[in-house]
Image (tube, helix red, strand yellow):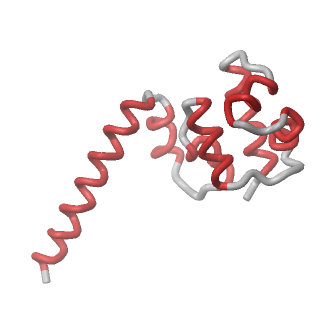
Amino acid sequence: MDYVDLGKRVRARRMELNWTQERLAQEIGVSTSFVGHIERGSRKASIDTLVLLANAMEISTDELLEGSLIVSDQLIKPVRRLTKGQRYVMNQVISTLQEHVSHWNDDEE
């Protein structure tokens, strides 16, 4: 896990929102100093904290963790441009496709 990269992404998104560290800390219920540590990569964020960050800043956890994921940019970049609502719909479509693909595999046997 690349915590320095995660911290840079958190800081970049916070700046896009024109939020202070204090505002982000209030939004997710942690101390301002903890937000600073996350942004510097000097403290680890739990999964719960990552989800709180993503929800508060309306960004996907994939975007926050992009530097640590082994995924093609061809998949991530288009998703990054979607709104939260669009990502939800896309997730539903993918879930439906996965469900049907598994049935297709059963038919081939």
* x and y, in percent, of residue 28 in the image: 68, 36
Q: In x, y percent, where is residue 91? A: 35, 46
| In the image: residue 99, left or right of residue 75 | left
- In the image, 24 versus 74, the foreground residue is 24
Report the residue at 61% width, 55% height from top.
69
In the rendered image, the residue lying farthest to the top is 18
Q: Quadrant of the C terminus?
A: bottom left
In the picture, the quarter occupied by the N terminus is bottom right
Give the residue furthest to the left: 107
The x and y percentages for residue 30 are 77, 39
Compared with 16, 57 (above or below) is below
Looking at the image, residue 56 sits to the left or right of residue 76; the answer is right
Q: Is residue 91 above or below residue 86?
A: below
Corner quadrant of residue 71 = bottom right
Image location of residue 47, percent across then percent down: 65, 55
The quadrant holding residue 15 is top right
- Residue for point 43% across, 30% down: 82
Taking 59 as reference, is 51 above or below it? below
Q: How many marks?
A: 0
At 10% from the left edge and 76% from the top edge, which residue is drawn? 107
* Vertical order, 36 against 42 (above or below): above
In screen coordinates, is 20 left or right of 79?
right
Q: Residue at x 78, y 41 (%)?
A: 7
User: Which residue is nearer to you in this view: 38 or 71?
Assistant: 38
